[in-house]
Amino acid sequence: NAGVMQNPRHLVRRRGQEARLRCSPMKGHSHVYWYRQLPEEGLKFMVYLQKENIIDESGMPKERFSAEFPKEGPSILRIQQVVRGDSAAYFCASSRAIGSGANVLTFGAGSRLTVL
Amino acid sequence: GQQLNQSPQSMFIQEGEDVSMNCTSSSIFNTWLWYKQDPGEGPVLLIALYKAGELTSNGRLTAQFGITRKDSFLNISASIPSDVGIYFCAGPNTDKLIFGTGTRLQVFP
């Protein structure tokens, strides 16, 4: 009965490198959300995806950030040419499609990115 | 856009004390959720509220959905050291959840 699985838990990158964060939603959940948490701050919405579709990317920075949720496999949040300001905890969450509890998100443990 | 403001921002209390925190919104919500984030972990759902005026308990935690639908309250009774963490309120904004600014709780033995 695995929950939302994120990996890696910790990732260190040098400025200019790429970071790839992976998320497998909870069994039975088809909606995936990515949030970013800067140190000592709250959770900021980035993007909402369903299988093969980006539904809402209003929280994604315009450049260097992309997300996908392919038909097979985990959702990926990709950050190209990382900068120090990208250092944060990135959380993935999933939810059921419809019905009771559709608004309730189950979160993973997060991926903590440090950019040197 | 919608914003959720939580108060207090942080609390330092002694074990055994009761705790109250609240969350207010600039607009109406149909659902209020309370999450707790332990250090180094992801948020975990504590309580979900779906109706104005609703009062729901989960062990030592009690949460209320304000009548105006613009606020919610969370109370923790007889706090223990493992209550330490950040408490977030959250509500739906179209197709996603938005989160409050958080209340950081420290409990001293």
Image: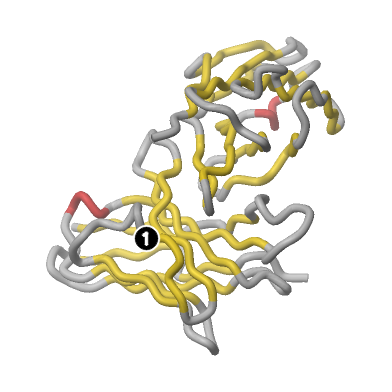
Left or right side of A96 for A31: left
Q: Amino acid at mark 1?
A: Glu
Which residue corresponds to the image point at 42% horizontal and 50% vertical from the top-left?
Answer: A45
Q: Is residue B85 visible?
A: no
**Looking at the rendering, in which quadrant would you find the C terminus of chain B?**
top right
Left or right side of A26 for B25: left
**Residue B3: image x %, image y %?**
44, 30
- Secondary structure under tag 1 reads loop
Seen in the picture, residue A88 relative to A66 is either above or below; the reply is: above
**Looking at the rendering, in which quadrant would you find the N terminus of chain B?**
top left
**Viewer-closest of B94 and B104:** B94
Which residue corresponds to the image point at 74% horizontal and 10% vertical from the top-left?
Answer: B17
Seen in the picture, residue A51 relative to A103 is either above or below; the reply is: below
Which residue corresponds to the image point at 35% horizontal and 43% vertical from the top-left?
Answer: A38
Which residue corresponds to the image point at 74% horizontal and 12% vertical from the top-left?
Answer: B18
**Residue A108: image x %, image y %?**
58, 59
**Viewer-closest of B15 and A113:** A113
Left or right side of A109 for B48: right
Seen in the picture, residue B70 relative to A39 is either above or below; the reply is: above
Seen in the picture, residue B9 relative to A5 is either above or below; the reply is: above
**Residue A21: image x %, image y %?**
40, 70
Identify the image quadrant of residue B71: top right
Identify the image quadrant of residue A116: bottom left
The residue wearing badge 1 is: A57
For label 1, the crowd category at 10 Å Cα-Cα, with few meaning under 14, some 14 to 19 and many 20 or more, is some
Q: Residue furthest bottom?
A: A72
